[in-house]
């Protein structure tokens, strides 16, 4: 049994950092950690004057530093000690802070090893893992945007209202537009493009030779009814009904599901439980209400106890884009292969790994005996900017928020008292709300003078999943 004694301030820095064989001609130094304080970077680099420093009570564990050639092509990563020597001798410069990447300023050999990138594709989360035959070089879990449907619905609502006011005399033209072949809904297209963009970002820092993707096809009717078979697929729950509304009224016995007829209102209406903006027209998302209760719900005077159906958006997304994703990646000449979820699960059970997107991506990439796992990155996708001319529900109130307040914008990565976090909310007075990507609250009202800018806001926010290691000087020991 390992007895660990955690001290108030952790000062232990591990010396057994996993090393990655590089090709820069310098021997790695296992006793040196990455420190680039004081380095000067180009003025046009958004990561200029950034330092990789430890935090109070934390230990940074950097498994590898990613390297680019003088021409900007990815090379095999090197150890932190080797990167420190290259930076000190002026043979490399910092081009990216997270993940830490350097670019050589001198010509060198470009010997590479086969690297396989595993992609655990999904609707809300994506797992990425790049491995060689010996170890894992890159690991990340990405959280995708979930506000696309609602924002597109709001934009459509504002557009229709504006055209009905400004150009009411114009002839309707919504039927003369043909959708091109391969058209996808904007929210689905965004998620498909995000998968490709993330894979290309990994290829900017690692010479990936093969991409493995997990694909899946889902039988929605089988999920609803595991015993369905044969002609039952043609005899759905809405058979013999004219439309969805008629079926919902029949299902609810033509009775208001809130007051159960106590209002004595004879007019019945079908209500979307989560709202039309984000909810589909499927029967699971509809409920029967009388007009009296429906008006109270619409005005916010009544809250329904009925919970919206989870739906099958994720399953439908994977069924639609699985082969589109594979084919689009093959177009530039990439070597792409696919696997299935049951194979990944079998490997995960055999290796006794916990269920996670990064572990699944590791197995999809072919990882089995690689003991050295890379530092895991947490990536959050956010909107690039807010171009709304008016605020949310009350469209007559103009959106006058400035992009920069006291030199900071939303989603900037900052350092606050030794803790890396992101600007979540801002006030004109200069006090900001700070959060981590996992939602952890750092400070609800931090003064801007106490913040140090680390990275400007980007579409993909990235932070390291830091590991808290014990202090061996206080009697703790590490497992073998």
Image (cartoon, rainbow, N blue to C red):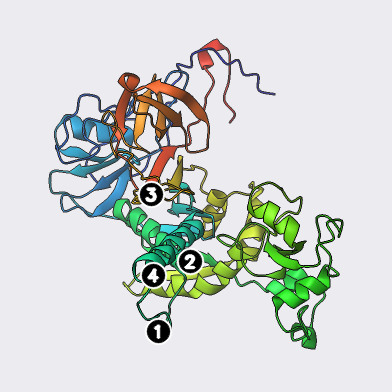
Picture residue at 76% right of the left edge, 79% below the top: 238
Picture residue at 33% right of the left edge, 23% below the top: 448
Location of mark 4 (residue): 329
Q: Position of residue 325 (x, y in %)?
A: 45, 70
Do callouts 4 and 2 mark residues in contact (Cβ within 8 Å)?
no
- Alpha-carbon span between mark 1 and mark 4: 27 Å
- Alpha-carbon span between mark 3 and mark 4: 39 Å
Near-viewer residue (423 or 272):
272
What element does badge 3 sit on? loop
Give the mark nearest the N terminus, 1 or 3.
1
Mark 2 or mark 1: which is in front? 1
Location of mark 2 (residue): 188
Dot 1, how many residues are within 10 Å of its Cα: few (below 14), some (14-19), or many (20+)?
few
Dot 2, how many residues are within 10 Å of its Cα: few (below 14), some (14-19), or many (20+)?
many
Give the mark nearest the N terminus, 3 or 4.
4
Mark on residue 178?
Answer: 1
Q: 298 left or right of 434?
A: right
Near-viewer residue (151 or 288):
288
Q: 134 left or right of 47?
A: right
């Amino acid at each position: 049994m390992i007895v660990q004694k955690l001290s108030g301030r952790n000062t232990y820095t591990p010396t057994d950092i996993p090393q990655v064989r590089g090709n820069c001609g310098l021997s790695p130094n296992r006793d040196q950690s990455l420190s680039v304080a004081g380095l000067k970077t180009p003025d046009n680099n958004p990561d200029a004057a950034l330092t990789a420093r430890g935090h109070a009570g934390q230990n940074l564990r950097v498994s590898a530093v990613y390297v680019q050639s003088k021409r900007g092509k990815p090379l095999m990563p090197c150890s932190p000690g080797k990167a420190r020597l290259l930076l000190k001798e002026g043979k490399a410069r910092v081009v990216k802070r997270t993940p830490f990447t350097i670019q050589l300023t001198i010509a060198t050999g470009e010997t590479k090893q086969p690297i396989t990138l595993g992609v655990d594709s999904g609707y809300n989360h994506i797992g990425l893992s790049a491995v060689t035959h010996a170890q894992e070089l890159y690991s990340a879990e990405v959280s995708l945007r979930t506000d696309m449907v609602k924002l597109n619905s709001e934009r459509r609502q504002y557009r229709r209202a504006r055209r009905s006011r400004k150009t009411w005399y114009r002839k309707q033209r919504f039927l003369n537009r043909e959708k091109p072949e391969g058209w996808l809904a904007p929210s689905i297209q965004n998620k498909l493009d995000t998968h490709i963009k993330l894979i290309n970002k990994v290829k900017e820092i690692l010479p990936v030779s093969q991409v493995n993707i997990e694909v899946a096809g889902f039988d929605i009717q089988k999920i609803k009814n595991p015993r369905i078979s044969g002609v039952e697929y043609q005899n759905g729950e809405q058979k013999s009904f004219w439309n969805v509304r008629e079926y919902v009224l029949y299902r609810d016995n033509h009775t208001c599901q809130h007051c159960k007829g106590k209002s004595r209102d004879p007019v019945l209406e079908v209500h979307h439980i989560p709202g039309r903006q984000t909810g589909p027209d499927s029967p699971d998302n509809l409920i029967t209400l009388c007009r009296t209760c429906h008006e109270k719900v619409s005005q916010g005077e009544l809250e329904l106890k009925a919970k919206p159906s989870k739906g099958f958006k994720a399953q439908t997304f994977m069924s639609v884009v699985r082969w589109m994703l594979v084919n689009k990646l093959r177009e530039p000449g990439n070597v792409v292969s696919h696997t299935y979820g049951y194979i990944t699960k079998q490997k995960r059970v055999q290796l006794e790994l916990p269920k996670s997107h990064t572990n699944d991506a590791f197995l999809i990439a072919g990882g089995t005996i690689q003991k050295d796992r890379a530092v895991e990155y947490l990536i959050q996708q956010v909107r690039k900017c807010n171009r709304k001319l008016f605020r949310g529900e009350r469209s007559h109130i103009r959106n006058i928020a400035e992009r920069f307040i006291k030199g900071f914008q939303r989603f900037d990565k900052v350092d606050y008292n030794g803790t890396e976090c992101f600007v979540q909310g801002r006030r004109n007075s200069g006090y900001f709300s700070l959060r981590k990507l996992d939602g952890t609250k750092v400070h609800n009202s931090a003064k801007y003078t106490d913040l140090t800018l680390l990275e400007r806001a980007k579409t993909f926010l990235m932070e390291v999943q830091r590991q808290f290691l014990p202090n061996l000087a206080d009697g703790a020991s590490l497992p073998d």
